[in-house]
Image: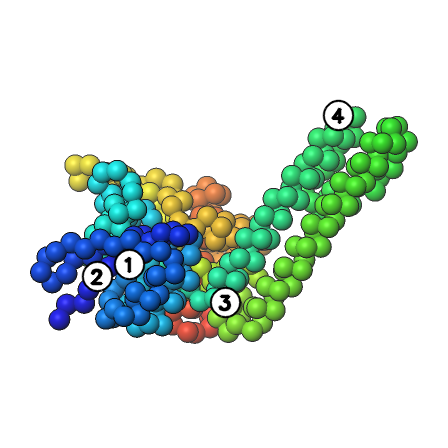
Amino acid sequence: MKQLVIGMDIAKTVFQLHSVDTNGEVKRLKLQRNEVIPFFTQLAPAIVAMEACGGAHEWGRKLSVLGHQVKLLAPKSVRPFVQRNKTDAADAKAIWTAVQQPEARTVALKTEHQQTILALHRMREQLMKFRIMQTNALRGILYEFGIVLPAGYPALTKAWADALSEASERLPEVLVVSLQEQWARVQSLDREMAVIERRLTDSLRRTEQCRRLIEIPGVGLFTATAAVATIGDPATFKSGREFASWLGLAPRQTGTGGRVRQHGISKRGNVYLRTLLMHGARAIVARRGHSPWLEALLKRRPYSVVVAALANKLARTIWAVLSHGTRFNAPAPA
């Protein structure tokens, strides 16, 4: 007997379901939040498809416990199947249609631990943005009075004492006090970021997959923990090349009449993880003692292209280590 397929559009209070029974009859059902679990508890095991949006992983874990097969789809894969007005019922029908396509791409169902790690990364990223805003404000204010602060947080930290001393000699006390308070806020943000980094370090030590990834050159604390939490199940991707393409590290292509042109990287995937991989690749390119492959690439291609190519290679290496459950083996020197 063919398994029933249900497209479910989730929300905070109202959930819309769409399915087609064996007789070809279309069934639409609207449920309140407290009615979802009782409904699926009484239902025979089915394929339940949802968009991978807020709350989807939690609902996926709950429905998986009840014996249902949960499939999470990226919103971009669902949007083309919304035919007319965008309503909850139309979204549920689009999800039902999208999940049955032969090339439907699913998102791995994340565990609570993986979601926790990603939440820590998001909080640290937000604190980083706050710190950048505060330090840029300090630079702009003091620049108005002829005091120039260097770019970069480490350089700013070293130059701050001299800049504040100069400001204290020339500027009004009320401004100097306000600058000191702003710098205290910057230091507070720095301490909060350090706390989150210690928690991520503790998670890395306790996770075997992260310990294997950190052995890869160019992969550090943030890249290793974010990669393991973002990928979820490596079997979601058929190959490392597909994973790199999913991250947006593959060239964007356009073509007609049998002629295909390749452009820059597509940048269609996870922005945060792609940024970490680009930073790791840039650190490898900047240091000395390159591999023969990298040296040859630097001679014939621009710097930014080399960084993107190396980030692509890092992504494929990460997938291989996670997929095969092996450790990274550095290539032997030529």
Q: Give the percent coordinates (x, y) of residue 199.
A: 62, 64
Verify CB contact (< 8 Å) between mark 3 and mark 1.
Answer: no
Verify CB contact (< 8 Å) between mark 1 and mark 2.
Answer: yes
- Residue 104 can be seen, yes or no: no
Q: Does residue 313 appear left or right of residue 236 in this picture?
A: right
Kind of residue at disc 4: Glu
Q: CA distance from mark 4 to mark 1?
A: 56 Å
Q: Earlier in the sequence, mark 4 or mark 2?
A: 2
Q: Which mark is residue 305?
A: none
Q: Please identify, in this view, whether the residue under mark 2 or under mark 3 is nearer the observer.
A: 2
Q: Please identify, in this view, whether the residue under mark 3 or under mark 1 is nearer the observer.
A: 1
Q: Which residue is mark 3?
A: 113
Give SS at disc 4: loop
Quick one: label 1, few (<14), some, or many (20+) residues within 10 Å?
many
Q: Which residue is mark 2?
A: 5
Q: Residue at x 47, y 66 (%)?
A: 112
Q: Earlier in the sequence, mark 1 or mark 2?
A: 2
Kind of residue at disc 1: Ala
Q: CA distance from mark 2 to mark 3?
A: 29 Å
Q: Which residue is mark 1?
A: 49
Give SS at disc 1: strand
